[in-house]
Image (cartoon, grey):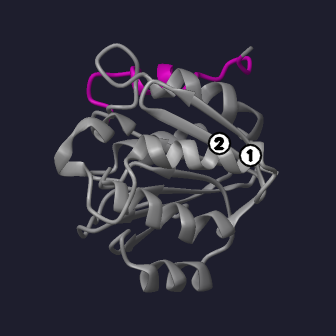
Amino acid sequence: MKYTGEMTLDELAHRETDYKLWTDKRSGDGMGYLPIYEEYFRIWRNDTIHLLEVGVNMGASVLLWLDYFPNAHIYGVDIEPRTRPEHERYTFIQGDQLSKPFWQSFIENHPKMDIIIDDGGHRNDQIETTYWCLWQHLNPGGLYCIEDLGAAYNPDCNRPGFGNHMDFMKLLLDRINMSRGDMKTLHFYRELAIIRKK
């Protein structure tokens, strides 16, 4: 059930042909993540939350989060310098998601997050490093989302010394089953994992 008078994430993404930029998260001509996110995110829609997206590219999804969460502060991380969008509720930080010192500095200088979305480089080493660095910086009850896990089947996205993306998902499931750590659930969709913290 959606809020009366408020558009869903997917409706916002399809609202106009010139939605500043096109986001591949929408349904139809995209990956279809937004209807899934709607089910998880809508309870926080009007709350004062902190959302981090890793891999913001030209800022299309940042604009979407700003529209959908009117009271949230959005943080974006990208290895490339990104000057847009400019908004009082948006903070951009340039950095390499493979760098543990970068994440340590991020943690020291920013509040804990309620939602973290990894839409970064999609390589196994990037995904694992980012997860292990940022999980501690996620609030209890928060969501950690990993997109584009189909990269697991691309040899260029698998680096030595790290398991395949699906091996990593299996490791997280094992930790839940063995009551290790503070993960509550891991839900898996096509190319998307959503992990909830206890």
SS class, disc 1: helix
Please state the horizontal and vertical placement of residue 33, each as a whole percent of the image.
Answer: 47, 28
Highlighted magenta segment, given as a residue range: 2-20
Real-space CA distance between mark 1 and mark 2, rounded to the nearest whole angstrom: 5 Å
Please state the horizontal and vertical placement of residue 176, each as a whole percent of the image.
Answer: 74, 46
Please state if 134 lies on the left or on the right of 128 as rendered. Answer: right
- Vertical arrangement, residue 182 with respect to residue 92, above or below: above
* Residue 48, quarter of picture: bottom right
**Looking at the picture, which amino acid does disc 2 mark?**
Leu
- Residue for badge 2: 173
User: In terms of depth relative to the viewer, which is nearer, 55 or 164?
Assistant: 164
Please state the horizontal and vertical placement of residue 115, each as a whole percent of the image.
Answer: 63, 51
**Looking at the picture, which amino acid does disc 1 mark?**
Ile
User: In terms of depth relative to the viewer, which is nearer, 73 or 121?
Assistant: 121
> In this rendering, does residue 84 appear at all?
yes
- Residue for badge 1: 176
> In this rendering, does residue 20 appear at all?
no
* Residue 49, quarter of picture: bottom right
Q: Which residue is found at the position 78% from the left and 57% from the top?
A: 182
Please state the horizontal and vertical placement of residue 104, each as a whole percent of the image.
Answer: 53, 83
Q: Main secondary structure of the magenta part?
A: loop
> What quarter of the picture does the N terminus occupy?
top right
Mark 1 surroundings: few (<14), some (14-19) or many (≥20) residues within 10 A? some
